[in-house]
């Protein structure tokens, strides 16, 4: 597996590189966001660790560009601890977020967890060829690809899995706890900002008007459902 570390502090890059290579990962290093994009253009990267504050191109803008073409897991590294920074990063498509200072063992564990869950697309290759379609939305489960009016729409792994859960059981209400368990495969925490941000991001991609959704409906006090008039 190829890991990209985009971090402007050489000591941190070196420490992370050593820790990851001990786990048999191949590591690419970039000291700024521009160098990181060049590496991604020339190598297959399976997971990216991005420092939020970097010269030339910061981590959030780098993440924004990555998400235009790729659904690889991304973990943000930052010295900031404010809740708003976490929400912004998740809103742009980050899969995880770790605040400096952190232990290398914790970071490696998070990397391994993301790669175990990575790319529902890969896991979906074992699913029988079939599609789920409602209105303009068609979910091809063999390709793990969403089409809207036959146009491909790029979703990251978390967005895809949430949409698949909802579409395969239309009009069933999923609590945030159920969605979190299904998608993140982890214990649910009382703060459900992660679910809210991912749902919001998904609505921006599939709804004609995200403020008045036709498909992903909030059931106040309960959770979310995929609305289908035929069920």
Image (cartoon, rainbow, N blue to C red):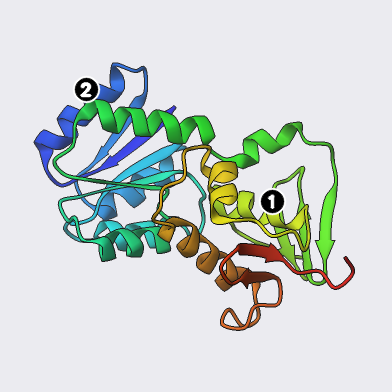
Foreground label between 1 and 2: 1
Q: Quadrant of residue 134?
A: bottom right
Residue 18's tag is 2
Rendered position, 208 above or below 186 = below
The image quadrant where one finds the C terminus is: bottom right
Q: Residue at x 15, y 51 (%)?
A: 79
Q: Is residue 51 left or right of residue 149?
A: left
Query: Measured from the top left, where is residue 219 in percent x and y?
Result: 63, 70
Q: Residue at x 52, y 68 (%)?
A: 200
Q: How many marks?
A: 2
Q: Secondary structure at mark 2?
A: helix
Q: Residues within 10 Å of mark 1 (few under 14, many from 20)?
A: some
Q: Secondary structure at mark 1?
A: helix
Q: Quadrant of residue 128?
A: top right
Query: Measured from the top left, where is residue 155 in percent x and y?
Result: 58, 56
- The residue nearer to you, when weighing 170 against 68, is 170
Rendered position, 158 above or below 29 = below
Which of the two labelled residues, at mark 1 and mark 2, occupies the earlier sequence position?
A: 2
Check disc 1 and report the residue beneath it: 165
Q: Residue furthest front?
A: 221
The image quadrant where one finds the N terminus is: top left
Q: CA distance from mark 1 to mark 2?
A: 38 Å
Rendered position, 111 above or below 67 = above
Query: Measured from the top left, where is residue 83 in percent x and y?
Result: 26, 61
Q: Residues within 10 Å of mark 2 (few under 14, many from 20)?
A: some
Residue 65 in sight here: no
Residue 102's tag is none
């Amino acid at each position: 597996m190829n890991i990209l570390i985009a971090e402007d502090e050489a000591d941190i890059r070196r420490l992370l590189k050593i820790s990851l290579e001990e786990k048999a990962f191949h590591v690419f290093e970039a000291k700024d966001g521009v160098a990181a994009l060049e590496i991604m253009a020339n190598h297959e990267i399976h997971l990216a660790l991005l420092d939020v504050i970097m010269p030339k191109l910061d981590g959030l803008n780098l993440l924004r560009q990555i998400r235009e073409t790729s659904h690889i897991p991304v973990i943000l590294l930052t010295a900031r601890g404010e809740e708003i920074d976490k929400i912004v990063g998740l809103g742009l498509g980050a899969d995880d977020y770790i605040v400096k200072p952190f232990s290398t063992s914790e970071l490696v564990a998070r990397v391994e967890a993301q790669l175990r869950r990575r790319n529902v697309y890969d896991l979906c290759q074992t699913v029988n060829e079939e599609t789920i379609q409602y209105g303009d939305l068609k979910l091809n489960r063999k390709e793990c690809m969403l089409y809207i009016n036959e146009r491909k729409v790029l979703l990251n792994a978390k967005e895809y899995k949430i949409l698949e859960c909802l579409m395969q059981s239309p009009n069933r209400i999923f609590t945030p706890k159920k969605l979190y368990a299904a998608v993140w495969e982890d214990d649910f925490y009382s703060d459900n900002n992660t679910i809210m941000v991912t749902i919001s991001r998904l609505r921006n991609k599939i709804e004609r008007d995200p403020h008045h959704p036709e498909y992903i409906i909030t059931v106040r006090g309960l959770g979310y459902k995929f609305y289908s008039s035929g069920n």
